[in-house]
Structures are given as structure tokens and as C-alpha cells.
Amino acid sequence: MNSSISIFLLLSLLPLFSLSSSSFSSPQINSNSILVALLDSHYTELAELVEKALLLHKLEETLGTHNITIFAPRNHALERNLDPEFKRFLLQPRNLNSLQTLLMSHIIPTAIFASQRWPATGAAVRHETLAGEYGLSLGEDSSGNKIVDSAAVLRPDDVIRPDGVIHGIDQLLIPRSVQEDFNRRRNLRAIAAVIPEGAPQVDPRTNRLKKSAPVPAGAPPVLPIYDAIAPGPSIAPAPAPGPGGARRHFNGERQVKDFIQTLLHYGGYNEMADILVNLTSLATEIGQLISEGYVLTVLAPNDEAMAKLATEQLSDPGAPEQIMYYHIIPEYQTEESMYNAVRRFGKIRYDTLRLPHKVVAQEADGSVKFGTGEGSAYLFDPDIYTDGRISVQGIDGVLFPLEENEEDSNTQKRTTTTSPLVKVAAKPRRGKLFEVTCNMLGAFGKVC
């Protein structure tokens, strides 16, 4: 009897133990959750973005403590009404934070039903979103239609679940921070915020800047990039002053900071970033050049390649700058453009900031190979950073320019070490007949 009672008590306590253990684990989402309803709803474009933004786990944690309200843009608004360039910007891995901010600004951590808690006309109420910095203003227009910020609510209370509700809206809500980030990163040819006043002109007789004259918008700087960069550290360690005045059309410092942060987040290029920022002033120089309108392509060796450099190669004054100058091409190239060029023309010689040396590129094994022989490097991580002004391409080796006169010098050394061949002229010998004749004449008192 006692054993049966103890078994009954043990079975009755099992649900309590399972409940307590589940309370310490991550929140479980049942099939009737608003999050599952979103993934299964007709808002397929929004559901796809939520999955790509890696927000499912965060939303599961939020549903463990709050009910939520989701303002879901219709598929048409994300497919056709959205700028294709802006959509590409959102889907790039480096812009994950912007995509998460954009999606979380459509979610309010409380359930607001259109039939119960919606503010009336003229009494708009602002609610904080999961994005934190961006709030949504809910209200009604003069016609009594429900609105949220600048979007109209087309399908109020479209999907209702115990832990939340989904309202269908006619357009995507874009926070200001995401829009500003997009404006900084997108191709600068599409930005019309600043009207260029024209690049400076150079007097060919004096090689000095003349009074600036109007040039077409987007025209490259007149001064060659080699005249704009700073002298070597043996002459002056100051960064490049650039050819223009105080007013600049591009924020080069911000773009350089952006691409260096991208190198660090990408992984495997910490040594390159350290040389640009700490060991040299090249980061400042590149920022100055970009601010003046120049474009650059940086061939960035990865950490494994930089580790093979000897200490002597970096210890000489100006050596790090010279190595990096040889990895900077004064034109904008992407992985696609370089590969198409080498496929079409074979070997391509790109100018570098280390005059007069050029870097050779050619097609090899379905990729682009830079340099020749043992000192070559392959395009390893393409398009690490591309913003229309700076292009960063990862390579698996450190490049060094070929010494053009190396073979000639070796030949001269071999020539000087060997003994010269000297032609010795033989003394003319008198013939035997001539000698006999002289003896006969000697007998008569004459000497030859």
C-alpha cells in the first residue's frame, strides 16, 4: 500500500520537475505563436528578410516576456516599390546591423489591436519599437483610415494570435539611421547631395594649380594621383595634402575607417589593418585622396602571407610604406572587372603608387594571379569592400616588384670575374735565307 502511494506521488510530481527544468532553458515557441504565423503567412518577403537577418532567436526571446505587434509591408512593396540598389544594400553581409534595425523598427513589444487600442483621429500615440532608437506613431487620418507613420494600414488585425497581432501596411518603414548608412555606402555616382564645383587645373608650364574652372560633375581630379600623395618618409612624414582646397566632395576619412573596420570584421586581415593605421600613416593618406575624388584598389595580403615577411623587410625606414604602395592600384577594379580583363587580354599591367613599378595580373586556375614566379599571389577573398571609391581585394601573398636590371647585373658580374683574353702578337722571325745572306755580306765587311 505504501509503495503504491509513493509511486503515485512520484508520478504526480513529474510535471512539476519538467516545468522547472524548462524554465531555465530557452523559451519554446508553440505552433500557435505569432512568429510561426508570420513565417507561414502571405507576407513571404518580410518573412524571408527576418530569416536572413538572423532575428528568429531574438524574437523568440522577446515573445517569452512580451506580446508583439508586427507591421508587415505587403510583398508588392518589397518586390517592386523598393529601390533595387537599397535591397542589395540590405542583403549584403556587412550591412546585417542595418537590416536588423530596419526589421525591428516594424515591431512593437506590446499587442495593439485595431479594434481595441488604436488611437482615434487627432490623438496619435508614439510607441517604442524593438529597434530602440526608432519609434512608430499610430493614429488615424481625416478620413478615419488607420496609419502608422507614413504608411497606411491596409489590413488591420490581419493575423491574430494569443501572443501578438500582424497588421498589413502598404510600404516599408525606413529609419533615418538606415537611410544615412545607405547613403554613405552606396555608389557615390547616385548621390546628388553635394554638387561638385569642379576639379583644380594644373598649369603644364609650372606644374602648379591654376584657378579652378567648371568641369562636368563626377569628373576625375586633374592633378595626377602621384603628385597628390605625400613624399616618402625619408623626405617628409606628413600625410598627403591633396590637390584641392578646404571644401571636399567626399568623406574619405569615413570611408577609410569603414573599410578598415570591414577588414577587421571579415577576419584574417588584422596585420594589414595594423600597418595602415599604426605602423604607417597610409590610412590618413588614402582618406585624403578619396576626399579629393581619387579612386583606389587595395590588394590586401592576408595574415598568413604577412607572417612570412622577415623582420628586416619591415625594419628599414620607409619599407612598410613602399610595400603597401606596391599593393595600391590608382583605379577602381572589382574581382569581375579584373577577371574579365585578364581573360580577354591575357597579361595586364596595372599601375601602382610605387613608381615606376607595375603589378602584373593574369588568369590562372579560374582566378586572377598577381606577380610572376615564386613571388606571385592569387585573388583569395574577392570584393571584401567595394563602395565605388575604394575596392579591397584579398590576396594570399605579399607582392614585390621585379628588379628589371637583375639579369644584366648578374651578367656584368660574371664578365668582370673572368680574366680577359689578351691576344699576344708574335715577334717577326727572320727567314733562314735572309740569315745566310747577312753572314755572306758580313764576310765582306758589311753588317745587315
Image (cartoon, rainbow, N blue to C red):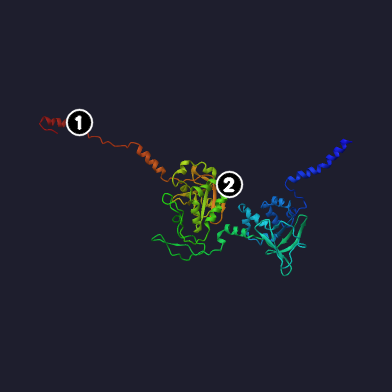
Placement of 255 over or under 434, stated as above or below:
below
Q: Which residue is mark 1?
A: 432
N-term mark: 2 or 1: 2
Q: Secondary structure at mark 1?
A: helix
Q: Residues within 10 Å of mark 2 (few under 14, many from 20)?
A: few
Residue 369 % position (x, y):
52, 47
Residue farthest to the right, as pictured: 1
Measured from the top left, where is residue 234 in percent x and y?
42, 49
User: Comparing marks 2 and 1, which lies closer to the viewer?
Assistant: 2
Label 2, label 1: how many angstroms apart (C-alpha)? 94 Å
Q: Secondary structure at mark 2?
A: loop
Q: Quadrant of the N terminus?
A: top right
Image position of 414 (left or right of 11): left
Q: Which mark is residue 359?
A: none
Other residues around mark 1 within 10 Å, as few (<14) / some (14–19) / many (≥20): few
Q: Is residue 394 visible?
A: yes
Kindly tell me whether residue 369 is visible in this rendering. no
Count of residue discs: 2
Numbered badge on residue 267 = 2
Determine the residue positioned at 41% across, 45% down.
Answer: 405
Position in image of residue 64 (x %, y %): 74, 51
Q: Amino acid at mark 2?
A: Gly
